Each structure stands twice: as structure tokens, then as C-alpha cells.
Image (cartoon, grey):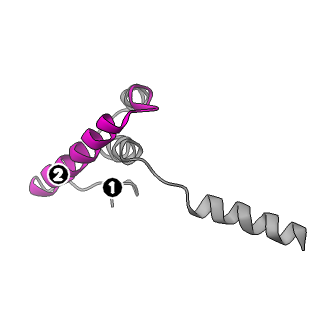
Amino acid sequence: MRIIAVSALLLTAAACEITEPCDQYVDYMCDCHLSASECDQLRAQLVGADAATQDQCEIDLSNTQAEDGDNGVTCDGDSGS
């Protein structure tokens, strides 16, 4: 019974993992716009971003997706959907 409880707790924790706005922004940019080296640089720049930077990432992601939509840019990556 104890093993089942521990397994359920681990699965719940994994399912509740929160994705930060900067993680979503980096994923979208890496999938749709950046080379591997540019992607690595952006990811390193935004790791552990504070709340204000997270807010800016959310705005930047929304603006980039809207601009891509306006320009007919489609993203082959799954993070941008």
C-alpha cells in the first residue's frame, strides 16, 4: 500500500509541473525562429528569471505568436501550438 501511495504522489507531482512563461517563450523561439546556438544563449539568459522577466516573456511570446500569425509564419515545433 505504501508503494502505491508513493507512486501516486510522484505521478501527481509530475503532472502538476508548472511551466514558466520564459520556458514557453524559449521553447517557441527555439522551435520556430532560432538556431541551436541562439537557442542555447536565450535559454541560458533566461534561466531562473525573476517575476518581472517572466511577465515580459509572456508578453514577448504573445507578441511573437501574433506577429507570426499576421505574417503567415507557421511553426513546425510543438511548443508553439
Disc 1 versus disc 2: distance between alpha carbons? 10 Å
Near mark 1 (Cα within 10 A), the count class, few <14, some 14-19 or many ≥20, is some
**To which quarter of the image does residue 75 belong?**
bottom left
Q: Position of residue 23 (x, y in %)?
A: 41, 44
Which dot marks residue 68? 2
The residue pinned by badge 1 equals 80
Near mark 2 (Cα within 10 A), the count class, few <14, some 14-19 or many ≥20, is some
Q: Is residue 74 above or below residue 33?
A: below
Residue closest to the eye, 79 or 14: 14
Q: Residue at x 78, y 65 (%)?
A: 7
Q: Is residue 36 left or right of residue 14?
A: left
Range drawn in magenta? 43-70
In the current view of this chain or complex, which residue is farthest to the left?
Answer: 70
Q: Tag 1's secondary structure?
A: loop
Q: What count of labels does the image hold?
A: 2
Q: Is residue 61 above or below residue 44?
A: below
